[in-house]
Image (cartoon, rainbow, N blue to C red):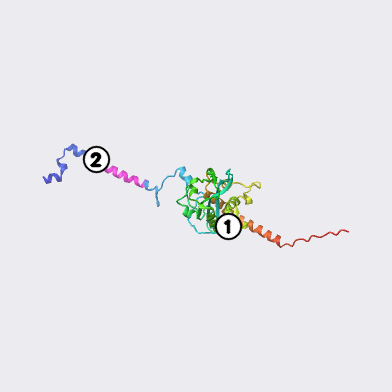
Amino acid sequence: MASKLKNPSKNLNPNWAQLLEKLKSNGSKNHISKHSRRPDTDTERSVLGKRKERSDEDSQASKPNPLIPTSSDCSLTDVVAMDCEMVGVSSQGNKSALGRVTLFWFNVTNNVANPLHASLWVTFSFPPASVLGRSTKYMKFVRPVEYVVDFRTEISGIRPSDLRKAKNFTVVQKKVAELIKDRILVGHALRNDLKALLLSHPKKDIRDTSEYAPFLQEGRRRSLKNLASQFLTVDIQNGEHCPIEDARAAMLLYQRNRKQWERSIKDFTRLKEKQKKRKPKKNRKVEKD
């Protein structure tokens, strides 16, 4: 009985035995063909693994965006970018008051070779609550002293719920004053932001993209949206304004023109010093006969 089980093929019908032989031969051919096709697929592999074909959308997404950062360095530096959003106060809501302030800093000595990369920026989707800790050193909603009549949400992005736990104006004002002291302040239309904060800043340390001569058009100031579109090829301020994005755009505009900008300021300062050193002409009195 055991010998029969060891050689079952001897007890099979000849037709079954022939069928088994055909199945074995076909199986070995398929096994060889599968292995023969592997070298072709291996040619598509690289050291990093199998190469994937990229769609047009993926290729467009891979293009660098100048407003997307590449580092998370959050050390305080000599250049600070600021942007403020306002709400409407007074009986008609036509008077502006500070509703939100955003500051972040950028080390000019870093990434000079590649102006697309700034030292503090990280990718975010608005509102970036999960990344504000390392992308922005200071971003606060502010409770105005006066009653808010118009939140101007369509532009400011500020809602009533944002101001319920907002910081008092005096607390924010004091902190901002500490952060911008003895530093270069970058922004767009900074006169409005400083006015809302009830603060002043030395003119020699202000870099306002709305007043920089090469950015003017026939002597007129241009919007930050317009400047970002022309000089940075990015589209911003579509709907609610993002203060971080606005501050980044102003900072990048300054960074790309930093050498010429700083040179023009030095030249202007030298000219003023020379004018001061000149002795004023004495007014000659004409004596009448």
Q: Name the residue under label 2.
A: 23
| Amino acid type, label 1 | Ile
Q: Nearer the viewer, residue 83 or 9?
A: 83
* Kind of element beneath mark 2: helix
Q: Position of residue 120 (x, y in %)?
A: 50, 55
Q: Position of residue 136 (x, y in %)?
A: 50, 54
Q: Tell which residue pokes out farthest to the left in this image.
A: 1
Q: Which of 166 and 125 is in front in this view?
A: 166
Q: In this view, does 128 lie above or below 271?
A: above
Residue at 49% in and 53% down: 135
Residue 235 visible in the current orientation:
no
The image's mark for residue 184 is 1
* Quadrant where the N terminus is found in the figure: top left
Q: Where is residue 224 in the image (x, y as percent from the top left)?
A: 58, 47
Residue 57 visible in the current orientation:
yes
- Which SS type dominates the magenta stretch? helix
Disc 2 and disc 1: Cα gap in Å? Answer: 82 Å
Residue at 29% in and 42% down: 30
| Amino acid type, label 2 | Leu
Q: Tell which residue pokes out farthest to the top in this image.
A: 15
Give, as a single range, the part of the protein colored magenta. Answer: 20-40
* Quadrant where the C terminus is found in the figure: bottom right
* Kind of element beneath mark 1: strand
Q: Left or right: 201 with respect to 279?
A: left
Disc 1 crowd, CA 10 A, few/some/many (<14, 14-19, 20+): some
Tell me, yes or no, whether the highlighted magenta stretch contains residue 28.
Answer: yes
Q: Where is residue 253 in the image (x, y as percent from the top left)?
A: 57, 51
Q: Nearer the viewer, residue 182 or 33?
A: 182
